[in-house]
């Protein structure tokens, strides 16, 4: 206490030693007021970012900006206007909120290299982000909700060319959800749903659409992935209409569900377009007159890993060069249908009202299974191949067209024929058993067909050929209930009655077949 007292006293003495200066002010004080923009700009973090804390903010200099609070706009006010290029705006988890009868979220025109990220823009009267004339911009990790209340011409995000738009949610906007003006943009992993129109996209962009809602029309070359199971309740409307070449739809093991009545198509492409690829999913309850679950009439389509259940038609592709692979079609009117020169492989068709699996002229059907279908289990067109397939308990197992090949197949327990073929065809290495008609039937009036090396047993009729000019060789035919052979004259068919061979241990009686003809058929 004593030291403190001495110091105070000394200071008092020093103060008393000096005289007082003039008390009259030297002049009016200079103004110290700053605009809100100046105040925000003058306060910078160590990282060099510029804070934004009020709506109506105008960015005039390149740099990195961030929100410090929610921005609530008023009538005719924008949340942020960007008047320069090379800008990053981090919404920093905050929101731009439209509270007035007009106004928009973020506006920029003819800017370059702008990034907007990490926040929410909602309830704006016009567009959430309006930047159609800007380029090389990035929009990511944004929630764009309930904007575009003014008219259908406003947008959630309206971006220009060479932009990057990734990982956004664009939901329930009154105009377009996502619009792209110009080409060269990259779009991926955006959930676009519930908007007046979800997409309005120019040609020439790199589109990876995460499909979150149907019905939808795809008008651009793109890759489409399902975000989850999708249900279409709109009657008399396609779930996915494809009006473009070069579209891939990956259903990601999800399901496309119809309401069960009066639908047209689950996935539809007309023959105007080509190169459709659909894979990895289920399609169910597409029913009603004239509807098909997948109808792709375009060229070069492909379908892989599709499970199709209870549809009017499962997969219908009437264009050329389709690939349908690892698909399942159950309880439809038609199961799987491929257009000209299609490849249908590793597919299953179960309990369809008419055909299980069908390919048009030039198609290849391989490693497929058809079971309990109401008409043909598997039907191939002219100039095609059916290879290594199984057809069981259908009305007719296989029907193969003109100038075709059927090989390595199993036809069993079908109501009528196991395999029926047309002219100029090759039937070899098949196994036909317990069918209600002929194991192998060459249709009436057909010729120039070769039937070779098949095993035909326990059918009503073994091999039936009703017209001349064919060759039947090296087949084993036996134990068919009515006739093993029903072959008219004028065909090359040499038949030997086989008996047991006593030279082999465990067999008894009989002699060797007794024929050295290498082309003989054997009956047993």
Image (spheres, grey):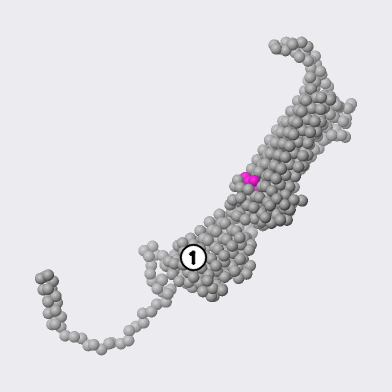
Mostly what secondary structure, the magenta segment? strand
Q: Position of residue 363 (x, y in %)?
A: 74, 41
Question: Residue at point 84% right, 34% down?
Answer: 443
The percent coordinates of residue 297 (x first, y second) are 73, 50
Q: Residue at x 70, y 54 (%)?
A: 238
Locate the C terminus by quadrant. top right
The residue lying toward the viewer, choosing from 497 and 459, is 459
Q: Is residue 150 visible?
A: yes
Q: What range of the chain is rendered magenta? A: 277-282
Foreground pick, 266 / 168:
266
Residue 390 lies in what quarter of the image? top right
Residue 70 among magenta residues: no
- The quarter of the picture where residue 33 lies is bottom left
Residue where numbered disc 1 is placed: 95
Residue 212 or residue 521, whichever sits in front = 212
| Crowdedness near tag 1: few (<14), some (14–19) or many (≥20) residues, C-alpha within 10 Å | many
* Residue 281 drawn in magenta: yes
Residue under the image location 84 percent in, 29 percent down: 464
Residue 473, image x, y percentages: 80, 25
Residue 414 appears left or right of 169: right
Q: Secondary structure at mark 1?
A: strand
In the displayed structure, 354 sits above or below 417; it is: below
Q: Residue furthest right?
A: 489
């Amino acid at each position: 206490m004593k030291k403190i007292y001495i110091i105070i006293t000394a200071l008092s003495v020093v103060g008393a030693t000096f005289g007082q200066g003039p008390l009259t002010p030297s002049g009016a004080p200079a103004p110290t007021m700053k605009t809100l923009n100046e105040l925000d700009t003058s306060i910078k973090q160590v990282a060099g970012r510029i804070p934004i804390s009020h709506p109506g903010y105008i960015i005039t200099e390149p740099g990195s900006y961030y929100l410090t609070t929610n921005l609530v706009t008023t009538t005719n006010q924008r949340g942020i206007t960007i008047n320069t290029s090379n800008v990053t705006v981090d919404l920093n988890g905050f929101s731009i909120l439209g509270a007035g009868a007009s106004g928009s979220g973020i506006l920029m025109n003819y800017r370059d290299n702008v990034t907007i990220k990490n926040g929410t823009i909602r309830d704006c009267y016009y567009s959430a982000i309006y930047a159609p004339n800007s380029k090389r911009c990035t929009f990511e990790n944004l929630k764009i909700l309930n904007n575009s209340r003014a008219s259908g011409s406003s947008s959630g995000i309206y971006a220009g060319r060479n932009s990057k738009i990734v990982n956004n949610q664009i939901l329930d906007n009154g105009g377009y959800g996502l619009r792209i003006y110009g080409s060269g943009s990259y779009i991926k992993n955006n959930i676009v749903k519930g908007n007046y129109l979800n997409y309005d996209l120019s040609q020439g962009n790199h589109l990876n659409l995460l499909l979150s809602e149907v019905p939808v029309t795809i008008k651009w070359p793109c890759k489409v992935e399902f975000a989850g199971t999708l249900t279409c309740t709109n009657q008399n409307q396609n779930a996915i209409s494809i009006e473009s070449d070069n579209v891939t739809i990956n259903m990601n093991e999800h399901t496309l569900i119809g309401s069960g009545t009066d639908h047209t198509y689950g996935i539809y492409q007309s023959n105007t377009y080509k190169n459709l690829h659909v894979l990895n999913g289920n399609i169910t309850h597409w029913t009603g007159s004239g509807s098909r679950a997948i109808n792709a009439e375009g060229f070069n389509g492909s379908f892989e890993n599709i499970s199709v259940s209870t549809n009017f038609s499962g997969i219908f592709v009437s264009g050329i060069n389709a690939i349908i692979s690892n698909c399942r079609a159950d309880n439809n009117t038609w199961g799987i249908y491929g257009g000209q020169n299609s490849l249908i492989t590793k597919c299953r068709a179960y309990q369809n009202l008419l055909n299980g699996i069908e390919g048009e002229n030039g198609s290849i059907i391989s490693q497929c299974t058809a079971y309990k279908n109401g008409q043909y289990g598997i039907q191939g067109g002219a100039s095609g191949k059916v290879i290594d397939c199984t057809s069981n308990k259908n009305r007719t197992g296989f029907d193969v067209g003109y100038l075709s090949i059927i090989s390595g197949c199993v036809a069993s327990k079908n109501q009528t024929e196991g395999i029926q073929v047309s002219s100029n065809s090759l039937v070899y290495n098949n196994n036909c058993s317990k069918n209600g008609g002929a194991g192998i039937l060459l249709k009436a009036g057909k010729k120039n067909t070769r039937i070779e090396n098949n095993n035909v047993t326990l059918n009503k009729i073994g091999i039936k050929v009703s017209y001349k000019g064919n060759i039947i060789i090296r087949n084993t035919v036996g134990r068919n209930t009515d006739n093993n052979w029903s072959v008219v004259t004028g065909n090359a068919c040499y038949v030997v009655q086989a008996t047991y061979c006593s030279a082999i241990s465990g067999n008894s009686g009989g002699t060797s077949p007794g024929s050295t003809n290498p082309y003989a058929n054997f009956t047993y």
